[in-house]
Structures are given as structure tokens and as C-alpha cells.
Image (spheres, helix red, strand yellow):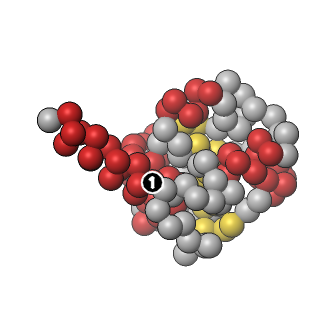
Amino acid sequence: MKKLSIFFLSLFTLSSWADVPDSIEGTILVDAEKVIELVETNDNLVLIDSRVSTDYIKGHIPDAIGLPDTETTAETLARHIASKDTPVLFYCNGAKCGRSVVACNTAVKEGYKNVYWFRTGWVEWISKGYPVEK
């Protein structure tokens, strides 16, 4: 039984680290500087950290909501985002992590109109020494 659990855990982990596209239809690709600009110019911007909870607890972009991709559904998005026109930004561990891809695709499928994707995510954020909240 233990081997079977490890096998499924491995499959799940690999799916989150699968090939990450260069763009996602229905989203606007941004870098760290654009994230800062969006935060400074959009009071209603919702930042969503799509990483697992243990990563979020270790540190995240200030004011980001921890919502792992595996928990991103129509219901959880509606709980955190005022309307489908509210700007929302998703990020995860970086360009090799697929968690924000899953979350962005869910948001677009559910009809959210102002979806931003910080593809290089956490890796770029911390490499540039930007603020971190714990």
C-alpha cells in the first residue's frame, strides 16, 4: 500500500511540474515589475498564490491569497474574487511549475476577464529581492 501511495504522489507531483506553456489563452503574461505596477495601480487586484500551503507559509508575495491549484474551483474563486471583471493575478514557483497554469485555465474557463499570469513567479520575485510576507 505504501508503494502505491508513493506512486500516486509521484504522478501528482509530476503533473504540477509538467511542460509549462509560454502563454495561456485568455491571460496577460506579466513579469515581477508589472506585478508591482499592477498592485500600485489596482486597489481591487487579487493576488493568488497557486503553490501548496507549505510553500505559501514559508513566504509569499505580500497580500497574496494562498489557494493551491488543486483547490481552485468556481466556488473558491468566487469566494476570493468580487466579480468576473475584477483583475486577478496567479503565480506559483516559476517557469517550470504548472500550478498557476492549472489555476489560470480554471479562471478563464469560469469566465474571469482580467486574468494576469506571473509565469516566472516566486523564483523571479525572490531573485530580485522583492518583499516577502510570512
Query: Which x, y percent locates residue 86?
Result: 61, 54
Query: Which x, y percent locates residue 64?
Result: 64, 38
Residue type for callout 1: Ser
Q: Is residue 85 left or right of residue 13?
A: right
In this view, the residue in front, 55 or 68, is 55
Q: Is residue 15 left or right of residue 40?
A: left
Q: Is residue 72 left or right of residue 38?
A: left
Q: Quadrant of the C terminus?
A: top right
Q: Is residue 68 above or below residue 118?
A: above
Query: Helix or strand or loop: what does disc 1 sit on?
Result: helix
The residue furthest front is 3
Residue lying at 84% horizontally and 46% vertically, measured from the top left: 128
Answer few, some or many: residues within 10 Å of disc 1's Cα (few below 14, many 20 plus, some between 14 and 19): some
Residue lying at 67% horizontally and 51% vertically, measured from the top left: 121
Residue bearing mark 1 = 16
Query: Which x, y percent locates residue 76?
Result: 42, 43
Q: Is residue 129 above or below residue 89?
A: above
Q: Is residue 40 left or right of residue 16?
A: right
Residue lying at 21% horizontally and 39% vertically, measured from the top left: 3
Residue lying at 58% horizontally and 58% vertically, measured from the top left: 96
In this view, the residue in front, 126 or 37, is 126
Q: Is residue 8 above or below residue 61?
A: below
Query: Which x, y percent locates residue 103?
Result: 48, 55
